[in-house]
Image (cartoon, coloured by chain):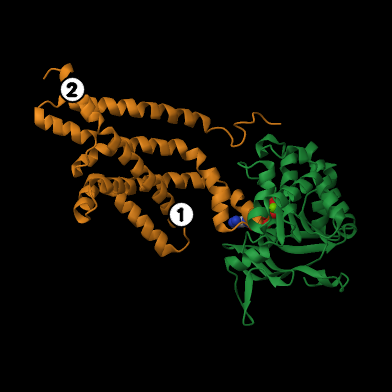
Chain colours: A orange, B green
């Protein structure tokens, strides 16, 4: 099969129409995983063992089953429509990884910060909001960004449940014209163009995150 | 150990009372039957060898460590317990929050919040815990930062200050909350020798103002002598000797205390 430029240019706009759905699904799923991931992390820290162990068990279960199987299961078990199903399933799946990232961020906040908060009589909620999370989250932003890119690259899975993202469109074009090389290559090209700058930006954040909070804008020690 | 209390004038008001307090970490018994009364406005210095239980004593008061048994009272109220129909029950978070407000602590490693400016370090708790308005909190914080000589550093971050300056901010941050009892755990131990003086001066100033009760763990014997009304020598989880700074530091009775103090004299 030889590459046909005319055909490629002809189908490019049609595939590009799927970008919105791909990006929309990515960000919806990511928003779910950021929120749910934090909730899972906090639930796992509860001293009430039955609950924290149950949550740990659910996380393990979600992680060891393939996302594609989960997609099909939820798609056929609940009648939510392809897009919503896709966003929720990928969001929930990735929340288990994101929860691990939060955990590492929270563990990196020294015990002494909790103790200082208690000495100032902050409530547990205030301690989380004012002291722990503001220190736990900045260092993990690059890791969260990596998950965003991985999630983005996973969205072609959604064609399994007929979400009209780019890969789904490419496959339809292939089925209509019996030409697969151009549509698939174009999809790959669009993914590359979108994720490479994000990856560069994350690497930039990683380099910056070595710095001590507060000192970034003010320079060296007085 | 109740004689610790009986030696002092009976008319004075007790603010902190340890009753038969035991503390063990696993099988390691750190404090065995501690009984101690601290009086309103009193400055008590705790000295003693490493591992003798000094930090554990004040961490239990700050509610950072729970006693294994016994009771602690602060200002007439149980700290770790709640009285329900005349019976003592374990305190819940609500009760702890109520009584903990009477206590403040300064740590060896300062423990400032690195992501907040000096001003916010000092205003966050008064605003959100005491319910002060932003302006009131700022005014009070500025007053305390002036007291520790750092009112020109309000917009800086902890990492931009020297250790001595950070520790003075930590003292101001605690003062802003107006605790009745202030705890100091070797607050100069992490500092370069040339910065120790500025922090001790600040504490002496606050001590000389009088009304705040202080419990200070220190290895600075001159400082203990200057500031303390009473010195406790801790050894193996017991108050082995106690009395005025003169009694304990100048006139040690036991061989243990003599050899402990000897280490400091030979260093001079
Ligand atoms: N969280 C903990 N878990 C286990 N053991 C502990 C803990 N905290 C303190 N200990 C033990 O309790 C004993 C007393 O410790 P503590 O910190 O009260 O002594 P200290 O008199 O303050 O000593 P130092 O002068 O070295 O600070 C030590 O044997 C220590 O190992
Ligand atoms: Mg100690």
Q: Earlier in the sequence, mark 1 or mark 2?
A: 2
A56 relative position to A217: left or right: left
Classify mark 2 as within 8 Å of ligand 1 or not, answering yes or no. no
- Residue A119 drawn at (x, y percent): 66, 56
The N terminus of chain A lies in quadrant: top left
Q: What chain letter is assigned to the residue under label 2? A: A
In the picture, which quadrant includes the C terminus of chain A? top right
Q: Which residue is mark 2?
A: A10
A90 sits to left or right of B40: left
Label 1 element class: helix
Is A50 placed above or below B172 here?
below
Residue B129 position by quadrant = bottom right
Relative side of B229 to A172, left or right: right
- Residue at 63% x, 72% y is B81
Note whether residue B11 is visible: yes
Point 66% across, 38% down: residue: B157
Residue B135, relative to residue A15: is it above or below? below
Front residue of A3 and A97: A3
Question: In what quadrant does ligand 1 lie?
Answer: bottom right
Question: What is the spatial separation of the Cα atoms under label 1 and label 2, in whole angstroms?
Answer: 50 Å
Residue name at image x 76 percent, y 37 percent: B152
Label 1 packing within 10 angstroms: few (<14), some (14-19), many (20+)? some
Residue indicated by mark 1: A42
Residue at image point 59% right, 58% down: A123
Name the spot of residue A133 as percent of width and height, x first.
Answer: 52, 47
Q: Nearer the viewer, mark 1 or mark 2?
A: 2
Residue A31: where, in percent of width, then height?
38, 45
Q: Is residue B51 visible?
A: no
Q: Pointer 2: residues within 10 angstroms few (<14), some, or many (20+)?
A: few
């Amino acid at each position: 099969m030889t590459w046909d430029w005319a055909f490629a240019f002809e189908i490019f706009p049609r595939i590009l129409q799927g970008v919105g759905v791909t990006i929309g699904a990515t960000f919806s799923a990511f928003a779910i995983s950021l929120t749910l991931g934090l909730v899972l992390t906090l639930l796992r820290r509860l001293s009430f063992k039955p609950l924290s162990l149950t949550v740990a068990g659910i996380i393990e279960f979600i992680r060891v089953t393939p996302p594609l199987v989960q997609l099909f299961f939820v798609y056929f078990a609940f009648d939510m429509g392809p897009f919503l199903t896709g966003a929720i399933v990928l969001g929930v799946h990735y929340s288990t990884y994101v929860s691990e990232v939060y955990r590492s961020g929270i563990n990196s906040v020294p015990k002494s910060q909790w103790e200082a908060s208690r000495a100032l009589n902050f409530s547990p909620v205030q301690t989380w909001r004012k002291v722990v999370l503001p220190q736990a989250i900045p260092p993990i932003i690059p890791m969260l960004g990596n998950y965003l890119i991985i999630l983005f690259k996973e969205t072609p899975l959604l064609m399994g449940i007929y979400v009209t993202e780019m890969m789904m469109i490419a496959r339809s074009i292939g089925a209509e014209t019996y030409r697969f090389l151009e549509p698939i290559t174009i999809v790959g090209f669009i993914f590359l163009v979108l994720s490479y700058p994000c990856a560069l930006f994350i690497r930039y954040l990683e380099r910056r995150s070595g710095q001590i909070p507060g000192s970034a804008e003010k320079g060296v020690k007085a | 150990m109740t004689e610790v209390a009986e030696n002092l004038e009976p008319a004075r008001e007790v603010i902190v009372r340890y009753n038969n307090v035991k503390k063990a970490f696993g099988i390691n018994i750190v404090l065995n039957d501690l009984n101690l009364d601290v009086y309103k406005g009193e400055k008590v210095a705790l000295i003693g060898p490493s591992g003798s239980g000094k930090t554990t004593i004040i961490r239990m008061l700050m509610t950072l460590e729970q006693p294994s048994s016994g009771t602690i009272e602060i200002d007439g109220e149980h700290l770790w317990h709640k009285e329900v129909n005349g019976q003592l029950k374990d305190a819940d978070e609500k009760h702890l929050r109520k009584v903990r407000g009477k206590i403040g602590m300064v740590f060896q490693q300062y423990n400032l919040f690195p992501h907040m400016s000096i001003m916010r370090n000092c205003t966050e708790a008064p605003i959100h815990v005491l319910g002060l308005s932003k302006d009131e909190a700022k005014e009070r914080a500025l007053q305390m930062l002036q007291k520790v000589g750092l009112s020109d550093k309000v917009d800086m971050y902890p990492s931009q200050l020297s250790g001595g300056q950070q520790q003075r901010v930590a003292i101001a941050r605690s003062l802003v909350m107006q605790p009745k009892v202030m705890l100091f755990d070797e607050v100069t131990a992490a500092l370069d020798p040339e910065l120790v003086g500025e922090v001790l001066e600040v504490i002496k100033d606050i001590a000389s103002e009088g009304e705040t009760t202080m419990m200070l763990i220190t290895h600075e014997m001159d400082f203990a002598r200057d500031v303390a009304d009473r010195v406790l020598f801790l050894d193996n989880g017991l108050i082995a000797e106690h009395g005025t700074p003169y009694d304990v530091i100048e006139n040690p009775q036991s061989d243990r205390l003599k050899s402990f103090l000897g280490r400091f004299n030979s260093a001079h």
